[in-house]
C-alpha cells in the first residue's frame, strides 16, 4: 500500500442552510441546520483516506488557538499523520458555507495563518518523501504557494512521486489564477478539476471543446468531476465519460469533490490502478452523510 500526502488548506467550517433566497440587509431568517466541523480541501480528503485505511499525512498549518488544537487532536484520533502540520501563532481560518435548497452553496472565507504556508514550508515537509501519491489542493486560497515557484517544487517531486492537483475556484477570479495553473499542468501526473474549473482554465465551452483544448495544450491527465453527471477522464489520446448513480438522499454536497479525489487516489495507492466507480461510490457516501459524524467538531 502506497503512502499518500495531502498538501493544502484546513479550516473550521460553519455550514448553515438551506435557504431559498438571501435575506435583505439588516434582516434575519431561520435555517434548519447550522453545523461546525472540520473543513478545507486537504482536511476533507485526509479524513476519507484515513477512514479507508490508507497511510495518510497532511501538510498544512493552523492557528495555535482552540480550533487548531482541536483539528490536530481529531486528525490524530483518526490516524492521520500530523508530522506535516504546524500550529503557528494566530487564528485558525474559518469558512462560512451557506447551502441553497437546490444543493448548491456559497462560501465566505478568511485566510488567517494560511498566508504563512509557502513554498519553503512545503518543501521542508516533503524533502524526504519518495514513492508517494501527493495531492496539492486548495491552491486557490493558498497565496503563499501562489506567490512562490510552485512549478519548480512540483517538478522536483514529480521525479519520485505521483503528483495530483485540485485547483479550487479562486476568490480573486481567474485573470491571474488561470496562467498560474496553466503553467503547472505539465508538471502534474493528474489534474483534478470540476467541470467549471476545466472550462475556466481552458476558456473553452462546451465541455467537449474544453477537453480538446486540454489535450492539445498539456501532457498531463485529467479527472474531471461533473456532479450528478458523473466524471470524465482525459488523456492525451482519448477521453472517457463515467456515469454515476444519482443519490436520492442528498444530505451534504460540501466536500463531495474532495471525497471523490480521496477515492480516486485510494484506488491507485491500494490497487495500483484507478477505479472511477469506487471514487463515485465514496463521493456518494459523503453526499449521503456517512462522514458527517467524523468531521463534526
Image (spheres, rainbow, N blue to C red):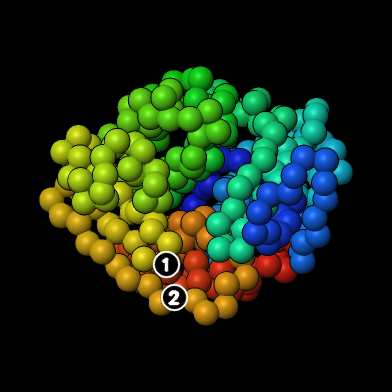
Give the image quarter of residue 121. Answer: top right
> Secondary structure beneath disc 1?
helix
Q: Is residue 127 above or below residue 257?
A: above
What percent of the width, then of the height, locates residue 142?
57, 31
What percent of the width, then of the height, locates residue 3?
48, 54
Q: Please tell me which of labels 1 and 2 falls first in the chain.
A: 1
Can residue 162 be seen here? no
What percent of the width, then of the height, locates residue 184?
35, 31
> Secondary structure beneath disc 2?
loop
Give the image quarter of residue 15. Answer: bottom right
The residue indicated by pointer 2 is 246
The residue indicated by pointer 1 is 228
Picture disc at residue 46: none
**Image position of 61 (left or right of 225):** right
Q: Residue furthest left?
A: 237
Which residue is at a point 61% across and 48% down the rendered structure image?
106
**Image position of 179 (left or right of 266):** left
Q: In this view, does 104 lie above or below 213?
A: below
Can residue 248 be seen here? yes
Circles 1 and 2: CB distance less than 8 Å? yes
Structural distance between the alpha carbons of marks 1 and 2: 6 Å
**Image position of 231 (left or right of 71):** left
Q: Which of 42 and 78 is in front in this view?
A: 42
What percent of the width, then of the height, locates residue 261?
46, 56
Number of numbered callouts drawn: 2
Amino acid at each position: 500500500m502506497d503512502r499518500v500526502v495531502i498538501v493544502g488548506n484546513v479550516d473550521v467550517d460553519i455550514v448553515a442552510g438551506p435557504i431559498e433566497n438571501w435575506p435583505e440587509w439588516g434582516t434575519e431568517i431561520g435555517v434548519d441546520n447550522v453545523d461546525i466541523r472540520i473543513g478545507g480541501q486537504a482536511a476533507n480528503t485526509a479524513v476519507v483516506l484515513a477512514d479507508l485505511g490508507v497511510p495518510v499525512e497532511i501538510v498544512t498549518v493552523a492557528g495555535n488557538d482552540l480550533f487548531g488544537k482541536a483539528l490536530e487532536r481529531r486528525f490524530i484520533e483518526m490516524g492521520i499523520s500530523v508530522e506535516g502540520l504546524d500550529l503557528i501563532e494566530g487564528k485558525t481560518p474559518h469558512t462560512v458555507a451557506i447551502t441553497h435548497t437546490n444543493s448548491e452553496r456559497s462560501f465566505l472565507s478568511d485566510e488567517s495563518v494560511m498566508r504563512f504556508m509557502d513554498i519553503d514550508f512545503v518543501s521542508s515537509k516533503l524533502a524526504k518523501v519518495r514513492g508517494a501519491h501527493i495531492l496539492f489542493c486548495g491552491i486557490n486560497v493558498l497565496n503563499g504557494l501562489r506567490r512562490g515557484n510552485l512549478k519548480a517544487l512540483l517538478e522536483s517531486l514529480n521525479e519520485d512521486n505521483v503528483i495530483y492537483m485540485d485547483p479550487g475556484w479562486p476568490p480573486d477570479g481567474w485573470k491571474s489564477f488561470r496562467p498560474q495553473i496553466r503553467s503547472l499542468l505539465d508538471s502534474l501526473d493528474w489534474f483534478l478539476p470540476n467541470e467549471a474549473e476545466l472550462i475556466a482554465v481552458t476558456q473553452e465551452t462546451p465541455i467537449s471543446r474544453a477537453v480538446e483544448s486540454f489535450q492539445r495544450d498539456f501532457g498531463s491527465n485529467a479527472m474531471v468531476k461533473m456532479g450528478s453527471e458523473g466524471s470524465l477522464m482525459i488523456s492525451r489520446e482519448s477521453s472517457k465519460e463515467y456515469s454515476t448513480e444519482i443519490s436520492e438522499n442528498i444530505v451534504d454536497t460540501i466536500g463531495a469533490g474532495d471525497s471523490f479525489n480521496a477515492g480516486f487516489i485510494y484506488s491507485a495507492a491500494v490497487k495500483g490502478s484507478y477505479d472511477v466507480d469506487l471514487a463515485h461510490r465514496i463521493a456518494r457516501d459523503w453526499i449521503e452523510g456517512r462522514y458527517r459524524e467524523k468531521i463534526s467538531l
